[in-house]
Image (spheres, coloured by chain):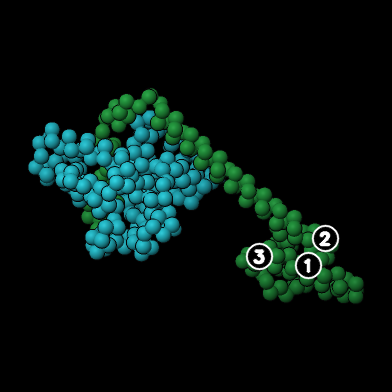
Chain colours: A cyan, B green
Amino acid sequence: MRLAKDDDDRLSALEVEAALVALSDADWKRLFKIAQYESAFDLSGVTGEELIHEAVLLLLDGTRRWKRGVHAFKALPFIAHSISDNWRNRDGLFDRTVAVDHGLSEDTNDGTVTFVQAVDNKTPEVIADGTSQLNQLLRALGDDDEAALLALSWAEDMRGEEARKALGWDEKRHDAVRKRLGRKLDSLRAMRERT
Amino acid sequence: MNTKDTKRSPDGIFLESYIAELVAMKDVDVLDGDPPGLNKEKGLAIVAAAKATVAKRRLDRARAAMDREKSITPASGKKFSPMEARAFLRSAANDSRFTLAARNHADMSDEDVMSLCEDIQRLMADKTDSGDAT
């Protein structure tokens, strides 16, 4: 188990453990929901909890890094996402030339810093051919055009009020669609298996 | 969040947005009637399991290293661990009696280090037997 050095910008195993233990009940639920969404794209049957386990394991053994000052919601989901991508590529479920990792930009005092190095070769053509998660999600949403529009606004980096205004919806409609999309993201695996 | 980074894929941006929406939700809505403490309990169990796996892997690695060291026995009869052999080579490299080509043995395998160590030991023994200590 590695120990933290004063000039080390990543959490030690002990600090990773302490950060996870400090998460609230609701925060764990949020992590499970995110991991469940990620696992829906893995056809090998891996669960969200298994993805979280693997991410924690890689953080504790030092294979992946958790940058100091970064919240668990910025560290774990993207590691889980990367693991999920790697497993899919390993299992040959997708073309190995498709993106294997994503960069996560984060706010810093001096601009932007990439937390997870991007190895992303998704081209518009690749996205259009249906291998991207977003396209799979849109397919799974089927005829629910409102949920699909909200999902697209999220993929365009618009959230909350910004997304609502861009879509021209009142608060009630936006809230209803957001809740519906949330429920569908929770059950995405089952929805994908049906489509 | 940086919105100017064109390297981010739509999948990555969607994930960031989904996370942001979940973080903005009230805890009570996120928990959606789950028994209090259930999710944290599950989370801590995952952390404990991962910690146990990491500890077991470390132990397995240490055990394998120990087994590897035990299996190396120099022909000269004197038992050296790879660590001892490396220490011996470091000392021999500073000894004027030897022109040691392998001064940088950091990249050598344990087996090669042991073999070189044995050669030097044998050479030293031969020189002593013939009365030539230089």
Q: Amino acid at mark 3?
A: Ser
Q: Secondary structure at mark 1?
A: helix
View extreme (front): residue:
A194
For the residues labelled 2 and 3, the Cα–Cα distance comes to 19 Å
The residue labelled by disc 1 is B118
Where is residue A179? Give x, y as percent.
22, 35
Q: Give the residue at x 34% y 59%.
A: A99
Tag 2 subunit: B
Tag in front: 3 or 1: 3
- The answer to whether tags 3 and 1 share a subunit is yes
Mark 2 Cα shell of 10 Å, populated few (<14), some (14-19), many (≥20): few
Where is residue B21? Give x, y as percent.
25, 39
The residue labelled by disc 2 is B78
Where residue B104 sits, quadrant-wise, is: bottom right
Residue placed most toward the observer, B14 or A127: A127
Mark 1 Cα shell of 10 Å, populated few (<14), some (14-19), many (≥20): many
Q: Amino acid at mark 2?
A: Lys
For the residues labelled 3 and 1, the Cα–Cα distance comes to 14 Å
- The answer to whether tags 2 and 3 share a subunit is yes
Q: Earlier in the sequence, mark 3 or mark 1?
A: 3
View extreme (top): residue:
B36
**Label disc, if present, on residue B130 of the rendered structure:** none
Q: Give the residue at x 48% y 48%.
A: A58
Q: Give the residue at x 22% y 55%.
A: B4
Residue placed most toward the observer, A170 or A111: A170
The residue labelled by disc 3 is B109
- The answer to whether tags 1 and 2 share a subunit is yes
